[in-house]
Amino acid sequence: MSLSFLTRTRGRGRFDLADWLTWAYLVLALLLMFGPVLWVALSSFKTEAALQEYPPTFLPLAPQTVMVEGYDEPLQLFRVTAGEHEGKVLAQIRRIGLMSQMVDPADPAQKFQVNINDRVPEREFALATENYSVLFDRFNFGLYFWNSVFITVVATIITVLFNSMAAFALSKYKFRGRTLVFVLIVATLMIPPTVNLVPIYLVVSQIGLVNSPWGVIWPAVATPTGVFLLRQYMLTIPDDLLDAARMDHASEWKVYWRIVLPLSAPALAVLVIFSVMWRWNEFLWPLIVLNRSEQFTLQLALNSFQGDLQTSWAPLLGMTVLTLLPITIVFAVLQKYITTGIAQSGVK
Amino acid sequence: MLATVKTAPSWLVSAAFGLFERPMLALQKMTGAQRIAWVFLLPNLVIFSLFTFLPIALNGVYATTGSDRILLGERPFVGLDNFSSLLACQNYLQPNSCERDIFWRAVHNTGYFVVVQVGLMVLFSLLTALILNRNIPLRGFFRGVFFYPVLLSPVVVALIWKWILQRFGVLNAGLEGLGMPTVNWLVEADWAFFWIVFVSIWAHMGFYTLILLAGLQAIPADVYEAAEMDGASRWRVFSRITMPLLVPTMVVVVVLSLIRAVQAFDEIFVLTGGGPGSATLLLLQYIYETGFAFRPQLFGVAAAASMLMAAVLLVLTLIQLRAARSRAEG
Amino acid sequence: MAIVELDKLVKDYGKVRAIHGVDLRIEDGEFCVFVGPSGCGKSTLLRMIAGLEEISGGELRIDGERVNEQRASERGLAMVFQTYALYPHMTVRQNLAFGLENIKTPKDEIARRVAEAARMLQIEAYLDRRPKQLSGGQRQRVAIGRAVVREPRVFLFDEPLSNLDAELRVTMRGEIAGLHHRLGNTMIYVTHDQVEAMTMADKIVVLRDGRIEQVGSPLDLYNEPRNSFVAGFIGSPRMNFVDAVVETVKERSVVARDASGALFEASVDSAGLEPGAAVSVGVRPEHVTFGSEGGKPATVQTIEQLGGNSYLHCVAEDGALLAAHLPGQTAIRRGDAVRVVFRPDFTHLFRRSDGVAQKRLVVGEAV
């Protein structure tokens, strides 16, 4: 067994200062990039009580309780750290000021008085899955999730369809005005939608799409990025193929969906990934258009919960994790594909 | 991966596309084989006209009309009043001396944010790209590590950091464990500003790292080999070969990140809400609040502010196009 | 039955005219080859027949019916492309079936035709492979197969062999010729390679700059080129040309003298020629002999001894390059001084003003 691959460097075979610095940087980055997400994930399994603890424990631990004869409620267990009862594990009956009245679970008849500073809670590993179940029971998570999925899926399908049709027209036909249309579309890359919030809102409200998922979908589907990306790709498909299909009795529509679309699969996949990412993560525009909580996307729901003064972190953390989970899974599976796709197209 | 795309319920796809076969053929008979292109363009163009071209044209109308009504017919013409109220300032360096002091505070914050965030982010992205370009094991994995936050939604990013930075959060616990003073990070103005810069770098640097890495890998290996034969030191290789060849990519990265920084909103809005006070209020949040969140809704002021922002973006984009062209030529 | 008629066919790209009123009649079952240098318009002409390029003027008739306005698929033609244009995302079988499916041919009929074409072209073993998994020759067969299953009136070939290596090209040439014999369809074949044209065609159409230079059987074109362009284009190695001036006009021949003083006699009609007229003397390498007197003095520069044939390349004192083709083997060595003599019966004479040939008086390849 050799670990030499770990020390493989620029082929010189020795591990010099630059290599040490490189690895220090990478390990630090690993902690900094994944650490926060991991911390949130761990925290999301803690009970509300454990979340209130300071300093926090690393793993989700819950205070241990025990049923003691003669008491209806379970009592919390503490280890006494000082005083005459040092070392004993006792159950707390009640707290009176700075003193805690405790009982030995093994011998319920005997009661003790312990200073609250002289005891620490006994804890055990416990996953507070209720942080997740409560999302579905009380917080309508299913509805928000569905709203997000609906917008993401529908908008992506329409985006891919419309953009690929336009790209097909712009790359495979010669007609008057082709250059003009293309330049117009690409030029709007310069004017991001954030600049036109007010008039877009007017259009959306006049069509009656405020507080409708379609108010989020329609303004987003004609992406200039998508048209540009697909057109550039379709230009590389040989025209002979299209001519061959025409000789094979294919109508122009058939040429589009039987020949050009399947052959553009790599570019379509990139656009699908982009579109899913854009729509799933979109925030400002839904914030403007969707004002009723039953229309909220996950992002809006998250935002409105955290803005609530009574923020209860336990379900909020659970919701955060569930929101980042789909993207994380997609990324884990398609990591290489996504990174090369984005590096090549240079858009985001 | 592509195979899975293809094995998706293909009969369903076929049926869906097949549905258009007859109407499209009928249209083709009417238009001829070339002008059918317009039929393919039509859906995209309609959406584009409604939600892009028309709004671009209307933005100016809003900016020159007043009142809180959204319908254009109900809005009185006010000329350049919206602009002049935004620009009315005794001293542009002192937001308090301006008629719309919050706007100017947002402009100041945004300017400061853009300079610091872009500067630091490009620096770290470059450093990371250079490190990832070394012949290290698990390179793909580490590339993914830096890129992962890019995919996270801004709201999620903000909540993750809010959880860490809260008064009794893990960061303060750690500091206390080390015997250092704790800080209420998002409540103290300067720290809040530091964290919005930090978080936005954390969330976006992976993207720019990726582009720079692609730029680095486009430099042919034989150039480096030639330099090695010439006995060039590492520093000289970096300063005389890597950097000059990377300049076009750097320009693209800088301009792209500038464009995005000017429009920064999502993470910051959720993380700090622009606070404390208006210490982290940026331009787009001002536009959003003025036009939509606060009553009365000052659409005209919001549109005017948008147009000022658009002017800045337009300049930046033109620089980018020029840079992209020189990259393509170089 | 498929007779293809081109009647003053014109193609304009904006203000540029690519095809200048081409007239041509291709008989039923004929193998017609369009040949010419690149950019001569031969592919454009083929694509106009196919329906892939709009016809700007004139009329195209198939079996007497005007088809200018018909779509490509309605003309009953099939085309084999230079790049094969196989659908990369479909298997060979799907490639063959695609066109038939589009016209809603019954499934069993498709299967029958695909099987038949596959057997004919020996591609049965690859029917379920993708084009990417095939060699160049196999792809070529599939491309032809795709045309065959359609059972078209006319086959169109657009430089189908230009992407193959030399050996495969010879094989495929034979197969396409064999296909023509078997099916008996009208075929139109575009190539820039005059060897392909000579070996395969019933009728060759030589094109230059969007105009027909000459139409005829391969040997007609070889023996009786109408002008110096056709003479130079057809035949390999190329015809030797020497610029000269008419010296004397005889009853059954013309004598010309070049700048170096060498005399050439050509058995051609002298109509329109006066002594002093500027001409080009042309002779094919196999009609060159080496004599001890007369002709043009030259030095042998290279010799290609192929065993059965010998090719000699000589350079004259004035720098003119002259090629000779001798049957069998030769004792001549590199550097030898020779006198290159043109056999008068096979010497062509072209007016230098417009390149038009004088009519030859000895017909055909009489020895």
Image (spheres, coloured by chain):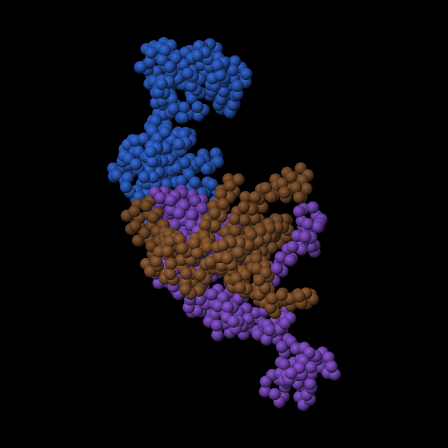
Chain colours: A purple, B brown, C blue
* In the rendered image, the vertical position of residue C5 relative to residue B158, given as above or below: above
Q: Can you say whether A157 is above or below B316 in the image?
A: below
| Residue at the right extreme, as displayed | A84
Across and down, in percent, residue A18 comes to: 68, 50
Identity of the residue drawn at 63% across and 88% down: A69
Task: Return the x and y of residue B294 as percentages of the image width and height.
Answer: 44, 64
Question: C63 or B278, which lies in front?
Answer: B278
- Residue drawn at the location 61% of the way across and 40% of the way down: B223
Work out whether residue B267 or residue A215 is closer to the camera in this orientation and state it.
B267
Q: Residue sitting at 63 percent across and 48 percent down?
A: B134
Task: Judge whether C107 appears above or below A294 on screen.
Answer: above
x, y (%) of residue B308?
45, 52
Residue at the spot 64% in from the left edge and 51% down from the top edge: B136
Tell me if I can see residue B309 in this picture.
Answer: yes
- Which picture quadrant has residue A155? bottom left
Question: Relative to C55, is A322 on the left or the right?
Answer: right
Res A177 quadrant in image: top left
Position of residue B249 relative to residue C306, above or below, is below
Instruction: Quadrant for the N terminus of chain C, please.
Output: top left
Percent coordinates x, y for residue A211 in the rendering: 39, 65
Does residue C146 appear left or right of residue B246 in this picture? left
